[in-house]
Image (cartoon, rainbow, N blue to C red):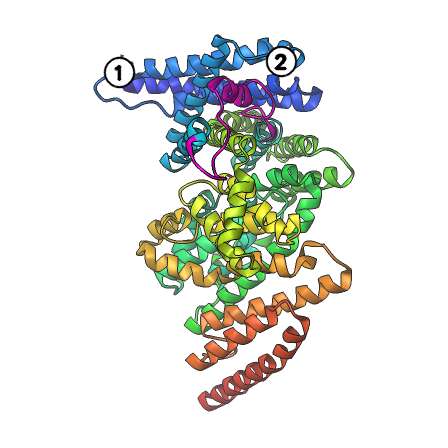
Amino acid sequence: MSSDIVDLWAERAVKLIALAFAAFVFWTAAMGQFPNIQQRATALALTFAMGFLLYPSRIKALGAWARLIDLALLGVTVAACLYVIINYWDIMMFPADPSPLAIALGIGLCAMIFELSRRTIGWSFGILMLAFSAYALWGHLIPGRLGHAPASVGLIVDTLYMGTGGIWGELMDVYASLLVLFVLFSSLMMATGAGQAFIDIGQLVAGRFTGGPAKIAVVASAFVGSVTGSSVTNVAMTGTFTIPMMKRLGYKPEVAGAIEATASSGGQITPPMMGAGLFLMAEMLDMGVGQIMLVAAIPALLFYISVLSAVHFESRREGVRAVPKEELPQARIVLAPRAVLPVVLPFAVLIGSLAIGFSAQRAILYAIISMVLAYLICAPALRDVPTRLLNIVAALADSGRALVTMGALMAAAAMVVSVIGFFGIGPKLSELVLSLGQGHLVATLLLSGFVVMVIGMGVPTTAAYVLGASVIALALQKLGVEQLSAHMFIFYFATLSALTPPVCAAVFVAAGIAEAPWFAVAWQTMRFAVIKYILPFIFVFHPALLLQGDTLDFLQNLAFVAIGAIGLSAAFAGFLFNRLRLWERIVLGLISVAVLWPEPVTSVAALIPLAGLGGFNWVRARAQTATAA
């Protein structure tokens, strides 16, 4: 049998498994979940069944027979999951040393998690898993405080496999109960036309202003990125439309790619979805998902104020105008109820359900139901309903790849986090970070941000955030940083790895679409996204922006940060009301940093020279306009 035929049958099997997985998740969300390990082990088994079929071992010498290896790996995974499902009550009620069979299955499952994460995420996370596994086995040989007491293989397997503190812990709980629903929600949103609807709305809202094509990219990417939760996916989806438009209307290729990469990175920090980070942060902080949405809204708003300002100043400097009116979609078509309802209603139901006290799981389920009903009701004609039903089924069937990537990542992260917790690595590494920072908050913050970005190179934001929170959060809290501020600091730096060289996946994709050198795109991206590098520090020094203070503090800090962000955008763009000379750009940048300074007296004092420089630039712009006239 040829490899093509085998791959075709494997693809069909994945679609059937994805549909079964969706049915399982919908049923348990509506009727109640199975006991913890049973629910999570079922989710893992179904995920890995799709994973080993979607990401086969490519051994050329064996050809199609290489699939037998994948079936063997799948068999090990299923056997390990079935063991804990069948023996769940004995494991919970009569804990004992694991049997030889349990040890073998536990080791086998850990190996399968490593292998599938290597195939889906890459070697970067696999190396981390190997490093922590080696530490668990041989860390007792390390002298000093970084070492640990000897631990047998049986004890390690018992920790990872035979309880709810290892593979079957909180991360797999979040995956099985929430993230699967989020992935299905995202797949359905894109399949029902939300992606194009967001782009159309972006054109309608921003296309008629100065720098319209770039502002379309910012608005559309904010919507799409919030649903997909991935900067790279966002660039690939919206960039194919926005980048060519920006180039055609006057932007340099590297600038067009940078604007799209920057805007796409904002989707992960934008409520109401924020990708997987929203649910993980809520779980780690033991806060409601709705509360995290509310807290994250202000920083996201400040990010987009900064990016839109940077785009506006860049467009004014380069003389890029609005999108021609004849190229913009018609409002009556874009805003027609049939087009808007399937897009807007799910978000309204999600936010409303959370606001009145439903769990996040129920809220997403209700949002999915409302989206499907709206999509069917808004069909142009009754004869189109069967086609739309098939589109829904196809979207669920095609969600397998996204589910596998997320599931493999969460299983691998659960292993690493369990080792970190069991052997006390977190406190040890946090002490090391504090030691290197010598107890100084700013130095420790700089070091922590660098560490999180390094962790995030080559791994998804979710993994970087989980690992960073396991190690860095404790160090920051020891220096007096609020827990929420510490986690937001880590989460924002985790998202920056997609933009920052040398490993900047979103930039690579944008550069490919723009047909520009990736390093030039990366440099321009860092210029447009400058506020995103500063916001994590603002969370620490201006905690009122995260709703940790009174209303007056919040409004005061919001005003200072917004003004400072706009000033920085102008300084990096080299334009305010007119082109800025080099000395003006430097002075404006320094004044803007002073406005952002945590001392209110400094911020207020900096407003005076800021107003003076702005007024000087405005007068010069008016004079040049009068001369030209």
Give the side of residue 592 with respect to residue 557, left or right.
Answer: left
* Above-or-below relation of 604 to 542: below
* Above-or-below relation of 617 to 297: below
Which residue is labeled 2 in the image?
Answer: 95
Precedes in sequence: disc 2 or disc 1? 1
Say which quadrant the N terminus sits in.
top left
Residue 224 in view here: no
Q: Position of residue 521 (x, y in %)?
A: 37, 58
Secondary structure found at label 2:
loop
Q: Nearer the viewer, residue 485 or 497?
A: 485
**Does 552 lie within the magenta span?**
no
Q: CA distance from mark 2 to mark 1?
A: 48 Å
Type of residue at label 1?
A: Ser
Type of residue at label 2?
A: Pro
Q: Position of residue 308 (x, y in %)?
A: 54, 62
Secondary structure found at label 1:
loop
Q: Nearer the viewer, residue 610 or 371?
A: 610
**Does 148 lie within the magenta span?**
yes
Which residue does the image show at 50% across and 11% down from the upper left?
102
Q: Position of residue 185 (x, y in %)?
A: 58, 34
Which residue is labeled 1 in the image?
Answer: 2
* Above-or-below relation of 561 to 459: below
Q: Nearer the viewer, residue 435 or 86?
A: 435
Q: Nearer the viewer, residue 392 or 548?
A: 548
Q: Which span of residues is magenta-colored?
A: 141-170
Crowding at mark 1 (Cα within 10 Å: few <14, some 14-19, many 20+): few
**Location of residue 613 (image quadrant):** bottom right
